[in-house]
Image: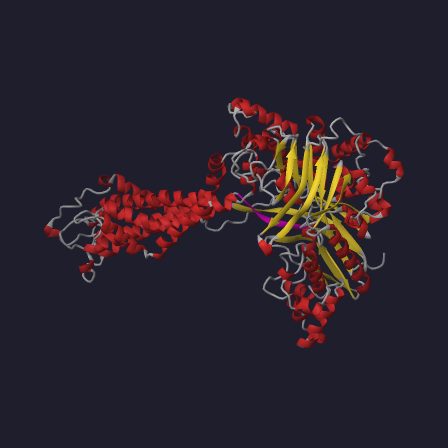
Amino acid sequence: MTEPLLRVDGLAVSYRTRQGSGHVRRTAVEGVSLELGRGEVLALVGESGSGKTTIGQSIIGLLPEGGRVEAGSIELHLAGRPVDLAKLPARAVQELRGRRIALVPQDPGSSLNPVQTIGASVAAPLRIHREDARWRDRDSIRRRVVELLDRVGLDDPERRAGQYPHELSGGMRQRALIAAAIALEPDLIVADEPTSALDVTVQRRILDLLDELRGELGSSVLLITHDLAVAAERADRIAVLRQGALEEAGPAREVLRAPATAYTRTLLADAPALQDVAPRPARAAGPNAAAPLVRVEGLVHEYGHGRDAFRAVDDVAFAIERGTTHALVGESGSGKTTIGRAVAALHAPTAGSIRIGDRDVLAAGGSPWRRDRSIRRLVQLVSQNPYASLDPRRTIAQAIGEPLRNWGPAEGGVRDRAALARRVATALDQVALPADVAHRLPRELSGGQRQRVAIARALIIEPEVVVLDEAVSALDVTVQSQILELLESLQRDLGLTYLFITHDLAVVRRIADSVTVLRRGAAVETGAAERVLLAPEHEYTRALLDAVPAPEWLRPTPADDRRSVDDRRAAHDDLRLEVA
Amino acid sequence: MSALTLLPAGAAEAPARAARPKPRATLVVAVLVLAVALAWAFLPWLFTSQDPIAGVAAEALQAPSAAHPFGTDATGRDLLARVIFGAGNSLAGAAIAVLVGLVVGTALGVLAGSVGGLVEDAVMRVVDVLLAIPGLLLALSVIVLLGFGVTNAAIAVGVTSIAVFARLSRSQVVRVRRSDYVEAAFGSGGTFLAVLGRHVLPNSLGAVLALAALQFGSAILAISTLGFLGYGAPPPTPEWGLLIAESRDYVATSWWLTTLPGVVVAAVVLAANRVAAAIREATA
């Protein structure tokens, strides 16, 4: 490699955190060394808490309050003479920031000033770095802003420049933020999870745009991501981080094809987009094939009334056989959550019918506090955010036992304390949580553990149908993979029927028997998972499938497919043991 | 359990830096002030041997001294004794006032917030009307209806705080009602009352308790105000507002008569506010 643009050597960062009445410094990053060549893309990959964002923040000199670089150097090589960003005074780093190093932030929703026009936000770096003689007067700044907005692919850039952030979609806002980042043609672009808040089809276009701009400007990109598939597809080099330390680093193909450490191997094995799993084959028509357990017909949901009415769900129909998983796939605004909540009898749709077995779900109306509660024993909902769905003041045992206390003994409920404790212990065991979790509070658990608690609570009254609303979307890949395994084994053991709502087609491939693809409230395609995923009929389904990041060279080979699922799972478990 | 092992594990921990004076110190002082005031209220005779009602005419209008730390008033009564014996009346009044506001206001707010719809609209419009009337005017109107006296003054002050309690508790209940865990509780088959008792009330009443402590301070002031205006306890009952009112003719010559009871009232009100802030922090 020629002279690198950025060389991080032995970086250590610590944060001041409260502990009891005083403060302690907690190390977030320790001994990390990286190199990024000119025009290269280096992906920093890791799970939450791995320190990847902290490294990015150290490089642009924007560590949050309480953060401090303890040791090491961050050398930026500009025109031959290296500067150490870690030792530079704040004033001098500010001088470089925006001009030489730019940031593309994670959340386009909160990264633009809501009371400033898009044009003003994009012009900010031009106005701040006035030393560049080209951007001294208003007209040249305005022309440059329009040119930039046009360059990042916003239609009608003149008009967009005068609009406010709330008038733009998430993808458009991210484009505007990229325009601001490239305004002064920086040498280094730090992109911190630039697409994590976006839909897959939008993600693909934004990543393409970043690639194009890099080629055009010759900038280097530090791509911070939790998504190994994105890194595999876009990066020249990959650095894998774990708990603040570098696990391994090297050219992308080498790291991913022949990972040196067990941790990287588990990450690879757990990333749904990279898993060598074929869609579940269509099941042989069972005796109940003619009478599916869940039947949704002509479902329509409108928000608002009269002419302002917005049709969130437009005439959707599907059926789920007992003991199978049906996936509702779609991007944000496709109506998938609205449908899921209607099936869970948490709100009443405008029209249509939902039946579970011989029960009409909507017979008693759909509202959280409806009179006739009996449907709740048939269908349960697990929501995306397990932290929000657990009462912060109640212990795990109280949360899991609560559904049983809501019912009389004749209805499958339990009132007796000792019996309740026994059932809670069984439920914890069922979701593979240790018994001592019972007396803790939700905030004392990790994200994966909380989702297990939410699943245990949903299952304790033995429902037949479970609606899983993005139940694994907020979790790290390894945890996500474990929860999916748990869901699969519970389905086998208890004969559960799942309605699995997700935006992630890679997850669908792994878990679903049948699929409905939604777009703007309408079902564009529905059918067996194998058929929909391998031979999609609708172009939107194809677009969604294409947008799943995964480079060709990592796709499973036919030889891999011959390995049985159980073999792969056994190998997978061995890996995890090795890592733990 | 690998989900656990993936958490950031034992990072090196440096010793804490030299601590600044802790904010807890002010809280300790506040609690002490309130404790002394409460002790005065319940066991006044432990703190003074002087008679708060009968004075010694020969010792009228004496400046603070070792024998009379707060001095004496125009009829020769020991001022400290009157302040100590007045604590009972003033604090009991404040407690009644807060209780009235807390119970009635919170009941209205929880009703409005949890039932919603027409009930909510009706209750909250009545609350708006209550808020539109100046507090003192409302208190005076209630007193005129109920008649003069310590208890009635306290109830009147309590009525003026109903609206604040109702508004706060309603907003808290509405916030909690919209949370995912309340929906999850209904979704698991919880009845309205079960969910209200298990989730909505425990999670929404922290802020209401903080407001109660805050109102305790302002109720002391409000009752003292009514006492000062002559609507509270009749003389010669020792009551903090009345003490200040009775002495206002002597401000120029005997400063201690108004200043020292005033300082006591201010200290207790400040202490109540500090405790309120602590409750708010603890429940936030």
Figure colour scheme: secondary structure
In this view, the residue in front, A118 or B23, is A118
In this view, the residue in front, B37 or B118, is B118
**Residue A331 magenta-highlighted:** no
Count every numbered label the image shows and give the total.
0
Give x and y (percent) for residue A269: 78, 39
**Residue A13 magenta-highlighted:** yes
In this view, the residue in front, A72 or B284, is B284
Q: Magenta span covers which residues?
A: A12-19
Q: Quadrant of the N terminus of chain B?
A: top right
Q: Which SS does the magenta portion mostly show?
A: strand
Q: Work out whether residue B74 can be spotted.
A: yes
Give x and y (percent) for residue B78: 18, 49
- B198 on left or right of B86: right
Give x and y (percent) for residue B274: 39, 49
Q: Work out whether residue B284 can be spotted.
A: no
Most extreme residue toward the left, as rendered?
B58
- Residue A540's place in the image compared with A288, above or below, is below
Q: Quadrant of residue A152?
A: bottom right
- Residue B74's place in the image compared with A328, above or below, is below
In the image, what residue occupies the spot 41% across and 49% down? B122
In the image, what residue occupies the spot 66% across and 38% down? A468
- Residue A292's place in the image compared with A88, above or below, is above
In the image, what residue occupies the spot 17% across and 52% down? B72
Give x and y (percent) for residue A193: 71, 52
Most extreme residue toward the right, as rendered?
A559
Q: Quadrant of residue A430?
A: top right
